[in-house]
Amino acid sequence: MTMNAKRRRMQKKLAALPGVRPVRRPVSPGSSEEFDLYYVRSGRKSAQPLVIIPGGPGVASVQMYKGLRRRAAATGLDVIMVEHRGVGLSRHDDSGADLPPRALTVNQVVDDVAAVLDDARVDTAVIYGTSYGTYIAAGFGVRHPGRVRAMVLDSPLLSRHDIVTVRRAIRRLLLRGDSPDTAPLAPKVRKLVDAGVMTAAATQVVATIYGYGGARLLDRQLDLLLENRKLLWWAVSQFATLGNLPYRYEEDLVSRIAFRELDYAAEPDGLPLDPAVAEREARTQKVSFEDEPYDLPAEMPNFNWPTAVISGGRDLITPPPVAQRVASLIPRAELLKLPTMAHSALDFREPAALAVAGAVCRGEVEGLAAQAPALDALPPRPEIRLLWKAIEVAAIVEGTLPAVRVPMPSRWRLSSA
């Protein structure tokens, strides 16, 4: 069976799932061409459902979050998820070809959410976005403010200028050791940078290990690297830099949004641990930045609905200072600080994400920040705990094995830092 045949077979299977519906949408503004944009609704229908917008761009909705929707429905939530145009079920035009570049803009994605609510006969909804999805959620608030009942911004993205804050947070934490738990790590990181092992492009791997494994696991990994033991480092890098996974993660078409409108691949500043370098080398499309669609710092003070802002204390992708600024801009925002969380509660702290979503849907946003310690104490789902426990065990085991040289991809080699 060819790859295209397998894809068509999976498309039919997913499109036939309960609650999945297509909506006819224009390929581009003013175009007579249309395509099927898919969405899925789970749980008992209500007047004001929860619209969940994943990150990326590139993270799919229908297949990727089947389990989450099932568990959300079990708690009484009415969930709608839209398959992002250019991804999964919403990837193709009527001829079966990939959507063209002109089809892929933030404004069209935002208006797709409104079109889905129209099709579902929903006037207002609670909008939950995570990571890149927070930008779409906020954009929905800008373009369709009358349709927002409340909002959850999980690990929020504010603007293309966030890169300055991200670089500062990473370097203060891991190069200067400004935190008590990373102070012992900083000399090791600096030594690996000087040796050309810890390249700017490897920032995603460092952020992943620290964020989800904590300072102790990163410390162990740094010791392995100093001993020229790179097996675990290589394995985690595969997890941190996934390629296209059909119907789960497909960034090849939509990465142009990340580059052209959000400047994910910002101009490198020439210093160590620059996440912009990692983005430049990991993304498949090389599109120059043109213009950001919204000025969210200017728009957010007009958001008059209750908003929960979730921030992970170990998040080095959208670090706490970004979330703090977002919360300060929105008049009715509650900032939930979860010290041991990394990036995206929706993906890696699902019990906390669903608890917050449930409270917001019940109209219980005020005072939610006081519950942050209890929410932070909620464990990740078993499979996430098992994954990082396995990585911790692997680090211990590798420390007992003879050092084996693993050839590193060129994108990890240091040019000059």
Image (spheres, rainbow, N blue to C red):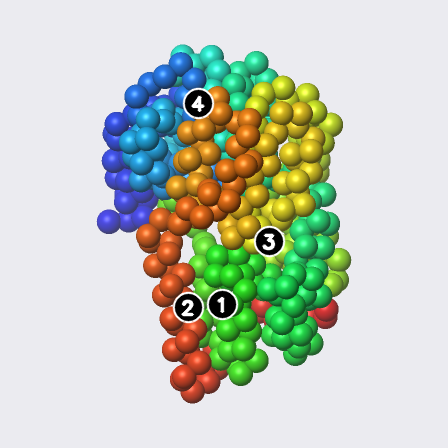
Q: Amino acid at mark 1?
A: Leu
- Say what secondary structure mark 1 lies in: helix
Can residue 309 be seen here? The reply is no
Report which residue position mark 4 lands on. 362
Question: Where residue 51 sits: x, y (%)?
Answer: 45, 27
Name the residue: 39% across, 72% down: 394
Report which residue position mark 1 lands on. 217
In the picture, the disc for residue 316 is 3
Calculate the distance from the C-alpha at mark 2 to the C-alpha at mark 3: 20 Å
Calculate the distance from the C-alpha at mark 3 to the C-alpha at mark 4: 31 Å
Q: Amino acid at mark 3?
A: Leu
User: Which of 39/392 is in front?
Assistant: 392
Q: Residues within 10 Å of mark 1 (few under 14, many from 20)?
A: many
Question: Where residue 204 sits: x, y (%)?
Answer: 56, 58
Report which residue position mark 2 lands on. 392
Q: Disc 2, disc 1: CB below 8 Å? A: yes
Residue mark closest to the camera, 4 vs 2: 4
User: Which of 395/404 is in front?
Assistant: 395
Q: Is residue 91 above or below residue 385?
A: above
Calculate the distance from the C-alpha at mark 4 to the C-alpha at mark 1: 38 Å
Q: Is residue 408 above or below residue 373?
A: below
Q: Disc 2, disc 3: CB below 8 Å? A: no
> Who comes first in sequence, dot 2 or dot 1?
1
> Who comes first in sequence, dot 3 or dot 1?
1
> Who comes first in sequence, dot 4 or dot 2?
4
Question: Where residue 382 sits: x, y (%)?
Answer: 33, 52
Q: Amino acid at mark 4?
A: Arg
Q: Amino acid at mark 2?
A: Glu
Calculate the distance from the C-alpha at mark 3 to the C-alpha at mark 1: 16 Å
